[in-house]
Image: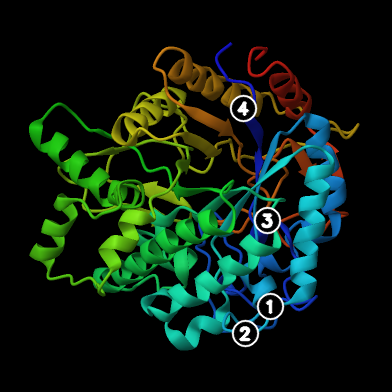
């Protein structure tokens, strides 16, 4: 059997994309709450405040806040061993810098974790997942070192409160997105220059390292991971210039992993900063903090691979799809322009395991596409089953043939949720269909797709039965 006993099969969501209840029960506004809906042709906009007449998908999402018991029961029916979810920071500290946390928010997550535990589901909690309290605007969000202390106070609150209920934590979702989508990554203007982005990233590294140490102090059972947004690229050709350009692109992404897994900035990045005149806001003792705050495991999302070459300047993000100036003629694409590359998953697992020699976890993977509800209410999503089957096969090879230490697999949007990239509901990933459209209209009723029954069988057989 490829996967060890206790392999963490499950699914993943994010609070801002599923909870709703954006301004009730004591919750304050977050960076996600001022992002309008978009689509493949229209980018999401960020407004200064919540404007009348605008569609903000996070405000109702799929109302997981009101349906969490029903949703977790469905996860349990599939046999989930693990549920990756996030805590909404502004549900705990509505303004971010509050003296006292919001008890209603804390109690809500108590209820969620208790519900998971009832079914033997292990929560894997992302501490900050594409939402930062909007109240931090006055500090300049993560460009300000004070954010480290605010984040640590938040961490101490949840580590203590949920001790014994949660032992797996991720510090920041897709931390490398500070280079591409800094507003989602930490409230930094999307047009900010590189100095600003790298300052914010530095503060997140310090915060993450301190959080790792704090988690271990509060409960020695705690395991804290980093989370990388799956950017993986092939060189366009065997032209040495294409090879070098591809290496340069991967350096822009992988340094985030290097800092969190190795505990220091790699020399290639420090040399780049020197050339560009970028100065990190280093304080006394910081190198020690990074060294002592290395993560216990590396988790990442895997959806697609890219191609880079000598003409690649940077990754342009256009309405939720990526553009490096090259395409891969060997790979099909989703309706949203993302390549489908199961073999690349094995490649990525090997690359990370060789590089860091720490346990890995795939915490996002899946096919976001249109689903059709038949007259009898059934949803025959064989395309999703095919996608997941091929990826799990390659994951098995990485474990069985290559010896990669893999902790678990939590496909993204195990229940249909709002897309982070475009703010759409029609881009569906789930095993569970939610009757709500892009405008938030619908019954919010949950129903099982064909993939629900297939994934249940996969988990029951520990990945052996993929038919």
* Label number found at residue 7: 4
User: Considering only order in the chain, which callout, 3 or 1, is on the residue closer to the N terminus?
Assistant: 1
Instruction: Give x and y (percent) for residue 300.
Output: 47, 42
Instruction: Give x and y (percent) for residue 141.
Output: 45, 78
Between 178 and 48, the one lying in front of the other is: 178
Q: Nearer the viewer, mark 3 or mark 4?
A: 3
Q: Which residue is mark 3?
A: 163
- Judged from the image, the secondary structure of the residue bearing numbered disc 1 is loop
Between 82 and 332, the one lying in front of the other is: 82
Give the Cα distance between marks 1 and 2: 7 Å
CB-based contact (under 8 Å), mark 1 and mark 4: no
- Judged from the image, the secondary structure of the residue bearing numbered disc 4 is loop
Q: Which residue is mark 1?
A: 101
CB-based contact (under 8 Å), mark 2 and mark 3: no
- Judged from the image, the secondary structure of the residue bearing numbered disc 3 is loop
Q: Residue at x 44, y 73 (%)?
A: 148
Instruction: Give x and y (percent) for residue 466.
Output: 65, 15
Give the Cα distance between marks 3 and 4: 22 Å
Q: How is the image coloured?
A: rainbow
Q: Residue at x 47, y 37 (%)?
A: 302
Seen in the picture, residue 163 relative to 447 is either above or below; the reply is: below
Give the Cα distance between marks 1 and 3: 17 Å
Q: Residue at x 32, y 59 (%)?
A: 290
């Amino acid at each position: 059997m490829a996967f060890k006993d206790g392999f963490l099969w499950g699914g993943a969501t994010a609070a801002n994309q599923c909870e709703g209840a954006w301004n009730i029960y004591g919750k304050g506004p977050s960076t996600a709450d001022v992002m309008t809906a978009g689509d493949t042709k229209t980018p999401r906009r960020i407004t200064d405040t919540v404007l009348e007449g605008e569609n903000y998908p996070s405000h109702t999402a799929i109302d997981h806040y009101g349906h969490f018991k029903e949703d977790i029961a469905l996860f349990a029916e599939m046999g989930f061993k693990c549920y990756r979810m996030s805590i909404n920071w502004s549900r705990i500290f509505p303004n971010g810098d509050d003296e006292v946390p919001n008890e209603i928010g804390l109690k809500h997550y108590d209820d969620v974790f208790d519900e998971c535990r009832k079914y033997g589901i292990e929560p894997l909690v992302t501490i900050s997942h594409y939402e930062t309290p909007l109240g931090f605007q006055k500090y300049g969000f993560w460009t300000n070192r004070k954010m480290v202390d605010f984040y640590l106070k938040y961490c101490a609150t949840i580590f203590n409160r949920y001790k014994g209920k949660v032992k797996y934590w991720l510090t920041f979702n897709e931390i490398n997105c500070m280079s591409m989508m800094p507003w989602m990554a930490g409230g930094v203007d999307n047009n900010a220059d590189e100095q600003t982005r790298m300052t914010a990233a530095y503060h997140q590294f310090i915060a993450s390292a301190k959080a790792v140490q704090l988690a271990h102090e509060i409960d020695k059972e705690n395991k804290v991971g980093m989370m990388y947004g799956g950017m993986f690229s092939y060189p366009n050709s065997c032209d040495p210039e294409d090879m070098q350009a591809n290496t340069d692109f991967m350096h822009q992404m992988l340094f985030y992993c290097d800092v969190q897994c190795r505990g220091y900035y790699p020399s290639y990045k420090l040399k780049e900063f020197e050339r560009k005149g970028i100065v990190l806001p280093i304080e006394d003792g910081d190198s020690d903090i990074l060294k002592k705050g290395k993560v216990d495991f590396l988790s990442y999302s895997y959806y697609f691979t890219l191609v880079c070459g000598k003409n690649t300047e940077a990754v342009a993000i256009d309405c939720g799809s990526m553009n490096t100036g090259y395409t891969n003629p060997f790979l099909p694409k989703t309706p949203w322009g993302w390549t489908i590359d199961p073999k690349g998953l094995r490649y990525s697992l090997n690359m990370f395991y060789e590089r860091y020699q720490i346990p890995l976890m795939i915490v996002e993977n899946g096919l976001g596409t249109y689903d059709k509800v038949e007259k009898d209410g059934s949803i025959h999503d064989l395309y999703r089953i095919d996608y997941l089957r091929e990826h799990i096969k390659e994951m098995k090879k990485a474990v069985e043939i290559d010896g990669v230490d893999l902790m678990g697999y939590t496909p993204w949007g195990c229940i249909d949720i709002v897309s982070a990239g475009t703010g759409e509901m029609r881009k569906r990933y789930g095993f569970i269909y939610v009757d709500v459209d892009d405008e938030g209209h619908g019954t919010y009723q949950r129903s099982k797709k064909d993939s629900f029954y297939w994934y249940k069988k996969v988990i029951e057989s520990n990945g052996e039965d993929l038919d």
